[in-house]
Image (spheres, helix red, strand yellow):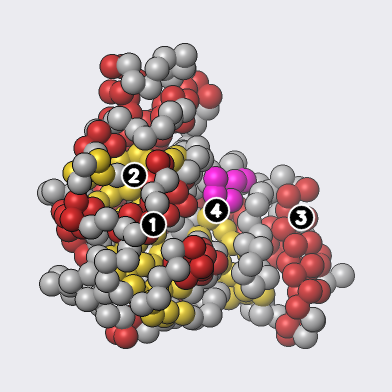
Amino acid sequence: MKPSTKPNRPFFSSGPCSKRPGWSLDALNDALVGRSHRAKPAKARIEEVIDKSASILGLPEGYVCGIVPASDTGAVEMAMWSLLGERGVEMCAWESFGSGWVSDVLKQLKLDNVTKHEADYGLLPDFSKVNCDNDVVFTYNGTTSGVKVPNLNWIPADRKGLTICDATSAVFAMDLDYSKLDVVTWSWQKVMGGEGAHGMIVLSPRAIERLESYTPAWPMPKIFRMTKGGKLISGIFSGATINTVSMLCIEDAVDGLRWAESIGGLPTLIARSEANLKAIADWVAKTDWIDFLAQDPSTISNTSICLKITADWYQALPADEQAAKAKQLVNLLDQEGVGYDFGSYRDAPAGLRIWGGATVDTADIEALLPWLDWAFAEIQK
């Protein structure tokens, strides 16, 4: 039978993600619109985003944090274009975005001393084979595969290379060992439910040293430049952004960070996300037509929770018909106003991808699950 209870907030997109509980446009009433982002009050608000982000995440001493253009994509590209080429590079990929970074390094930067460590959707590469005397580029959480790195034990403290980590669907929801990471990037639109277009980048002292001692062989676009005269442009990490930021987006980011502080900071954010995963895991354990895309339980993401349909009749269908059936299921719940935008990513295997980040209430996840069973029964008809 069709369930009677619907999620209060049926927003399960993996980006832009659900706003924090209780959010409304009133949260933006104090936005400094019409003001220069260089004005003292505006700059102070920008600095608040930087300072609260660093504080909530517990960044180590000496690390700097800044706002950069073009979301997480811009932040990752900035890091690769500015830092790579000084030594060999180890590229790790197991889903769409990681594969995109591999392509950029090989086809755009055209580096030749590159080792690829790749795995199919649902798996991780063998990190024991990664040479950390080279620079390493990897995603912490595969947003399109639902597969996360379980730990960073494979990165030695005395590494010679830099570790560049795309952590956009991991920060604020997973416990990262920042001492093992030299560059960390993310966007506001993921775990904190902020608006798009702006990215964040964190640099370790080792990354800063590389920036100040190494000049890449290629021309550097203005929005990627983090040094001037051989020194770090410190203003980027104290509110003087490279280009104009949206003060509406800044206000929204501040609102999310203040909410995070009010509920207990990082431990509570992680606990909320893990509770969402547990609700889905308990349902998967008792449901015979669904399973996690991740094959190793220790690698199942608690943010971008990717699921595959395992029913025999479904698996017997050609790939295009499987994709059509999965899309039909998602569309049914969209039409019912039960859940929006939780289909798998276009490059990923057909299935479901339910965002379980910290802004999603577990009660809404629990209300969604019976509807998934109903919709699955409907697509068999």
Q: Please give the residue where the numbered disc 3 appears in the rendered image.
A: 331
Spatial CA distance of label 2 from label 3 is: 43 Å
Q: Residue at x 32, y 85 (%)?
A: 129
First of labels 4, 1 by sequence position:
4
Q: Residue at x 47, y 14 (%)?
A: 34
Q: Regarding mark 2 in the picture, which secondary structure is present there?
A: loop
First of labels 4, 3 by sequence position:
4
Q: Residue at x 66, y 80 (%)?
A: 310
Q: Residue at x 59, y 46 (%)?
A: 11
Q: Please give the residue where the numbered disc 1 appears in the rendered image.
A: 218
Q: Which residues are magenta?
A: 10-16
Label ID, residue 154: none
Q: Amino acid at mark 4?
A: Ser
Q: Is residue 237 left or right of residue 18?
A: left
Question: Of the residues tagged 4 and 1, which is closer to the observer?
Answer: 1
Circles 2 and 1: CB atoms closer than 8 Å: no
Q: Please give the residue where the numbered disc 2 appears in the rendered image.
A: 225
Q: Where's residue 48, x and y in %?
A: 28, 30
Label ID, residue 14: 4
Q: Nearer the viewer, residue 188 or 283?
A: 188
Q: Regarding mark 1 in the picture, which secondary structure is present there?
A: loop
Question: Of the residues tagged 4 and 3, which is closer to the observer?
Answer: 4
Q: Nearer the viewer, residue 169 or 23?
A: 169
Q: Amino acid at mark 2?
A: Arg
First of labels 2, 4 by sequence position:
4
For disc 2, the neighbor class at 10 Å (few under 14, some 14 to 19, many from 20) is: some
Question: Of the residues tagged 3 and 1, which is closer to the observer?
Answer: 1
Spatial CA distance of label 4 from label 3 is: 16 Å
Q: Amino acid at mark 1?
A: Trp
Circles 2 and 3: CB atoms closer than 8 Å: no
